Structure formats: C-alpha cells, structure tokens
Amino acid sequence: MRGLIAGSWLAGCTLLAASTLSYGEETGGWKAGTARADITPTEPVWMAGYASRTHEADDTLLPLFVKALALQDAAGRKALIVTSDTLGFPKDMAERLRARFKDSLGLEREQVILNGSHTHSGPVLRDSLYFIYPLDEARIRAIERYSAQFEDRIVACVGEALDAMVPARLSAANGVVRFAVNRRNNREAEILDTHDLKGPVDHAVPVLKVAREDGSLLAVLFGYACHATTLDICRWSGDYPGFAQVELEAAHPGLTALFFAGCGADQNPLPRRTIALARQYGRELAASVECALDDPMTPLDAKMDLKQTEVELALTPAPSRETLTALAQSDSPWQVRAAKAFLADLDTGKALATSYRYPVYVWRLGGQLVVALGGEVVVDYAVAIKQALGRDTFVMGYSNDVMSYIPSVRVLREGGYEGATAQMAYGLPSVWTEDIEPRIMNAVRELAGNTK
C-alpha cells in the first residue's frame, strides 16, 4: 500500500525545509500514548455544517472517530491533543471536558488542545449552531443524548491514551499539498476553467512523527488549512481528512493517524462534491505526510512549554430592535431563527453580547512551535504567524472553542459570509471590530516570546 501511495502521489511532493533547526539523530526522553473511540451516531441525528440539508444522516461512508495523543517530556510534564471528526468543540462542551480532565486526570487548561476536523459530514453537537438547522424538540433531545455520549467517550479515550504511554521519539517537518483554493477569490462554478487562482492560501502540511523506541510509528499528527467540505451528502464521514487517516493507517499497521484543521475558514477543496474527489484529496494529503516521513525530519528534544491565554475581542454595536424585527421577516430561515432569538433576549431584559473571550494557545514541543487558535480562522492568520514566528510553525484553527468566523482586517472590511454574515449563525449579534487581528497577533507573539 505504501509503495502504491508513493508511486501515485509523491511525484510533485516537496518538503518545506526547516530554517532554524538542524537535522540530526532523533532524541529520546519522550513518552507517548494514543487511543481512539468510534463516535458514529447510532440513532438519527442532524448533520452539522450545511443549512440546506433536509433530514438526518441516513448512512455511513466512513466511521467517525475521536482520537487522543498524550505526550510526556523528560521532566514529566504532560500534554494532550484530542482530534475529532466533528465541526469543532463548542465552548460549553470544551469547558465541561476541561473540568473533567482536571478532576480525574489533573490536567490544567494549557495542557489540552481540542481540535475538530471541521468535517461537514459529522453530527450537530449541543449548544452549537442551532440557528442554522430546523431543529424541533425531538431532534434537540437526540443531539443532547449523542453529545453526552460523545463527551464520555472523549474522557475515556484520553484516560486510555495516558495509560498507554511508552518511551518515544518525536520529530517534525512540513510537507505540501495544493488542493485548497481560496473560496472568496475563486468561483466554484468556474473552477475547472480557471487558470489563474487568486487569494492567499496555506498549502503546508505540518507533520509530527511519534515513533516507538524500535523506530516503528506510533502516531502521526498532521494538519491542513482547508474546509472539510468536499461532500454534502447525508452520509457520515470525516471527508478528505477521514480518507487521509484511513490511508495512512492502512499503510502503517499499529499507527494512529490524527488530523487537525488549520486556518482554512476561507479555503475549500475545489473541485468538490463527489466521493471520488474526497478520496483523491485524502490520498494526496496522505502522500504529503508520507513524503515528510521519508525525508529527513527535525528531531525534537524531550522538553515542552505550554502557554495559553484569552483575549477580549470586541463586537460592533448590536443591531437595533427594528433591524432585528425586519430580519425576522426575511426569506432566510436561519436568519429568521437567529433574529427571533435575539428579540426574545431583549424582551426578557437580557443584553446582547458586546465582546467575547477568545482562546489562544502557544506550545513549544522541543524546538517545534505550535499555535492553536479558536474559531473558524481565515488563512491570513497562518500567513502572518509564519511570517512572525517562522515558516515551520504549526498553526491550528478550530481549537478549544468554535464561536464564529475569525476574519482578518482585510476580510472584515471586504465583508461577505466570513467577514459578516456568519456571525449571527453562531449566535453573535454583530461583527468584530477592526482591532481583532492585532489583538490576536499580539497575544500569539507575547506567548511565543515567553516559551522556551
């Protein structure tokens, strides 16, 4: 299988060379453990991501999984990365999970990163994006039952990963794959006739290799900055990230492959909308990971520094009651639901939100910087962070909380779905103020400067 992957896909693969770290023998001192749990719903549950769906999932294309990677450095410090075939972790769910991790496992907030692949072929989770979907009480109860089971399985999975830790060696590199297209600057309907793609992209494939002492692969953590929206059918799957993980695990028995979503909020896999394309993109992504694994990687010393903070992001003034009343009579079903919910808050004396506390994480695993941002982050942030901290930096989006789209100043001024419209879908009454980008970037720089 691995030979087939190499022969089919590696011809165009290149590696982004490390600019600040030297190559050499991998260093020991780490411990690592992995675990997984099947989270495919067993009863009908509404699917997340698209407002246009008219019924629950009716079949499974690929089983859905939550996976955990537990790490421990030479000083006994632990870190945990949880990935899942879901749209992302809503704030309230993430807070409940963190509380359980602390109570039962002694893990503090900065020691845990929760990341959703942002597949649009996974289940709706409770307290997330209810405005988008036509949910009655029975459907909401089904989502709540599923979500409770989902949280229990995550906690159990994390415990298993910590219990399974064995001596390990870590190394890192960046591959590249090019199917992500800036969807704001290129029309999907014209993509096959477009020869001059426009707009910023991040085609890097960050790869963290976790090997056992005998050199065999224990885990591979990898990411990509692109929406997992190849498919819009009513069948459960992890979309192209799911196919990529299946491909890697088939090529390396005993491996746990974990995917994280990067800053791909304004990036789509194009063309799209067929299973064949989802499988193709998964194979391309897996081939890029294989390329990184086959070429020299940067060994990581067994020490880590884990930092996190929250940044207060301001919202522009909320729309007036008159504006909300007009929106409640519009032709958009989800905007009608959102406007009615805001009006109900006003009727009960509840003030609409004026700001939001936004999570920023910066980890250093040996010499490898990892930045994890909450929300649906546009690609401009990955570009800016790599310019500031080095092009080999791993940048994750959709981490620890998915509260809305996170536009750059450029996207905010341009408006459109990512810059403005999507805010109400997430339950925020207005758009971000223009200091959003410098506030987030300042927090990243400050945390990175404080890590060693």
Image (tube, rainbow, N blue to C red):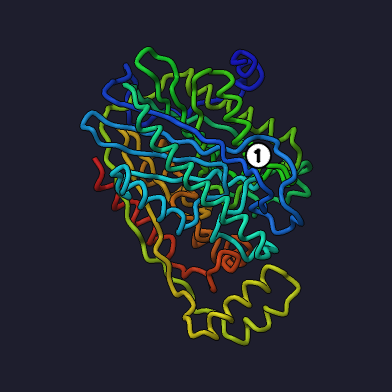
Query: In the rendered image, which quarter contains the N terminus?
Result: top right
Using the image, determine if residue 372 lies above or below residue 343.
above
Residue drawn 52% across and 26% down? 289
Whether residue 130 sits left or right of residue 396 in the image: it is right
Residue drawn 70% across and 59% down? 51
Residue type of the residue flagged with mark 1: Ser
Decide if residue 181 is in sight here: no
Nearer to us in this view, 184 or 339: 339
Q: Position of residue 409 (x, y in %)?
A: 49, 62
Q: How many marks?
A: 1
Nearer to us in this view, 443 or 89: 89
* Label 1 SS: loop
Residue drawn 60% across and 17% down? 6
Decide if residue 385 is in sight here: yes
Which residue in the protein does label 1 denote?
Answer: 237
Nearer to us in this view, 148 or 438: 148
Whether residue 346 sits left or right of residue 189 in the image: it is left
Q: Position of residue 447 (x, y in %)?
A: 29, 50
Whether residue 30 sits left or right of residue 370 in the image: it is left
Callout 1 crowding tier (Cα within 10 Å): few <14, some 14–19, many ≥20? many
Q: Position of residue 86 (x, y in %)?
A: 57, 46
| Figure quadrant of residue 439 | bottom left
Residue drawn 56% across and 47% down? 264
Query: In the rendered image, which quarter contains the C terminus?
Result: top left
